[in-house]
Image (cartoon, rainbow, N blue to C red):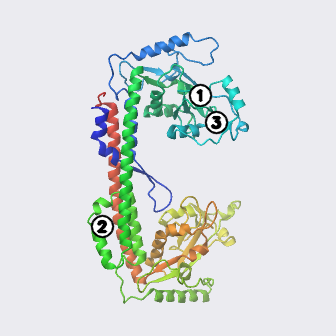
Amino acid sequence: MSAQEIITRHLDLWTSAISHKSTAGRGTNGKIELTGIKKLRELILELAVRGKLVPQVPTDEQAETIIKGIEQAYTSRPEGKQVKVHSSTDNIEAPNEPFEIPGKWKWVQLKAIGTIGSSSRVHQKDWKKAGVPFYRAREIVQLSKHGHVEDDLFISEELYSSLTRKGLVPETNDIMITGVGTIGIPYVVGANDRFYFKDASVLIFKNIFKLNPLYLRLFFLSPSWQQSIHEYSMGTTVHTLTISRAGATLVPLPPYSEQQRIVEKVEELMALCDRLEQQSSDQITAHETLVDALLDTLTQSRDATELADNWARLAAHFDTLFTTEHSIERLKQTILQFAVMGKLVVQNPNEESASVLLEKISEEKRRLVKEGKIKNPKELGAPGNETPYPVPRGWQWEKLGNFTLVGTGATPSRDRADYYSPPEHPWVTSGETDQDYIFETKERVSSLAVKETNITIYPAGTLVVAMYGQGKTRGQISELKVAAGTNQACAAIRPLNKELHHRRYIKLCFVKLYDEIRDGAAGGAQPNLNTGKIANTLIPLPPLQEQHRIVKKVDELMALCDQLKARLSKASETRLRLAETVTEQAIGNGVLNG
């Protein structure tokens, strides 16, 4: 079977196998990665360097001819030539031949077909704002991926001239290879390139014997090369690729003419991958746009009749619409939107209105103040005309701080060991609000810390909101399942009505309003919330009995969404495994040349 047939026979597999790059914060899908097409690109490169991508031609010269020519040039090189070349017969420690290659090919160590070297030392004090570009590993990676880089480092013309007289300088068709961080990434030096490079951070392969640089580049991009250099790379937290290790790496070398045929075929197939990738991205974008538009029609329905009609149209295509993580997450958001707009469950006009509930809470607040159990909280005033949208009869917009208690905490001094030992009271930090419930905390504080610092031990059932933190932490909400204090980065919300569904309704409002609450944060590089903003958050409050129905219905629908997501994840995992299996089988056997 040819490489082209492998691609076309499994086209649906390559385009449907996707994965998700997770990102921090609740309610995010992360970015989609077209994993199947990524695997296909890797397969093409691997078939190329194994001699399975194009047919061998009987009239091609043996690769051995190239080696002999190199050895002859090596032995007859002029005295004093600065370029150092190793004979292919040098006794160098190297791994065994990694895989079988065609008969006319030759395994050869990289340093036997050119020179692997580095640059002369350039000190940071010599970096300039203009002059000759000076590239580190990160710039080589950018050049490899995009073909250009934003030059932010330079050296002077004088220093460049001095360095190039003493050592190696990049010339057309040489190959730069990253030596630290993301190691082994190649860049072929172009005819118009003029730059210098950082010692140890970047290696240079001097292509002095005029091998096809594009073939060498695709070898340096292949999984085989990456596996080889990472297997033997040195360093603990940061991988490094040394000159000696790179030079000892075995390269599968085809005849000259086959190198060119391989390059042309790889370019053709990579162009096909580009088209597949674009088509897949377009289809994903179109699907997301369609789902968003249809769900928007639901939330914009003028009345129950129109909502029922819109839902019926959407439900008829449910199996084809909700087939991605994005669509399921969007459905979840729509469910929450219905919940806080009063469109999720039936209203009962005989139930006590939200105004009655708020009056009862006010009475409870006055009682607690009179008994000295709480301080008299600041009245925030009525919402007025600032409400975001109309709510059903019996509902009422209200500021959170008018029917709950909003507080915060503190961080005891780290210099006081007795503030943390004995570890008596659970103590919450903002990073722990990424979970729905907090059963245990990473740290505990002592009773002395609670007594001497601004820490309140809040009862179980208190809602904790992150006011600041890294990434999308701000605005996250969790519920304490144990009595605990918090640090100053958290707001603690204590509902004065102790009904379970009351605090859970408030919690789902915060989940729905997550982005709006984050947008309300103030500050510079890292915008923050504060207890005042939390207390002034507007909540659309239904009657207490309706809150119970809403919470119950949300739980039911979210469970269904989670089941959909689990099935989707299992199917996606299966497609990814199939893509890997097809790749392994194509490389190992069953692929004919051509």
Q: Position of residue 385 (x, y in %)?
A: 52, 83
Amino acid found under the numbered disc labelled 2:
Leu
Between the C-alphas of marks 1 and 3, the distance is 11 Å
Residue at 56% over, 9% down: 76
What's the distance in space between the residues labelled 1 and 2, CA to CA?
A: 60 Å
User: Which residue position holds label 1?
Assistant: 170
Foreground residue among 85 and 314 = 314
The residue wearing badge 3 is: 134
Three-letter code for the amino acid on which mark 1 is drawn:
Pro
Q: Is residue 495 left or right of 451 when viewed as pictured?
A: left
Left or right, 550 with reference to 531: left
Q: Residue furthest right?
A: 125
Which quarter of the picture shows residue 528? bottom right
Give the residue at mark 2: 314
Element type at marker 1?
loop
- The amino acid type found where label 3 is placed reads Phe
Q: Residue at 59%, 68% (x, y): give it.
A: 529
Where disc 3 sits, the SS reads: strand
Q: Is residue 481 visible?
A: no
> Which residue is located at x 59 percent, y 66 percent?
427
